[in-house]
Amino acid sequence: MLTSQPEVSHLMKGEFQRFSEGKLLIFLKRLDTEITLHLRSRYPQGESAQTVISL
């Protein structure tokens, strides 16, 4: 999959809101970047639970 010049320009300007999360993950994987997501409840009740996903 090719990335267009306008897409590269938006990335370089930090305009990440123009891209889906999936597309941003694809860009990072192409750069051979280790990706780790930490997921936790915004409003924890009682015991804290956290999920970690490495891609």
Image (cartoon, rainbow, N blue to C red):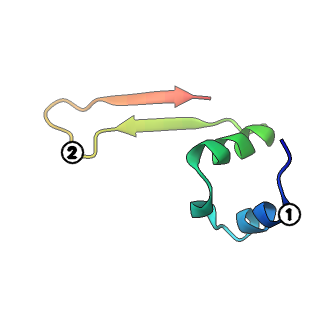
Badge 2 is on which residue?
Answer: 43
* Residue at image point 80% right, 43% down: 31
**Residue 6 at what x, y percent from top left?**
80, 66
State how far apart marks 2 and 1 are (Cα): 41 Å
Mark in the foreground, 2 or 1: 1
Q: Is residue 9 above or below residue 26?
A: below
Q: Secondary structure at mark 1?
A: helix
Using the image as rendered, state which of residue 51 and residue 12 is in the foreground. Answer: 12
Q: Amino acid at mark 1?
A: Gln
Q: Secondary structure at mark 2?
A: loop
**Residue 24 at what x, y percent from top left?**
65, 48
Q: Number of marks in the image?
A: 2
Spot the residue most to the left.
46
Decide if residue 13 is on the left or right side of residue 43.
right
Mark 2 vs mark 1: which is more N-terminal?
1
Decide if residue 43 is on the left or right side of residue 39.
left
Badge 1 is on which residue?
Answer: 5
Decide if residue 3 is on the left or right side of residue 44.
right
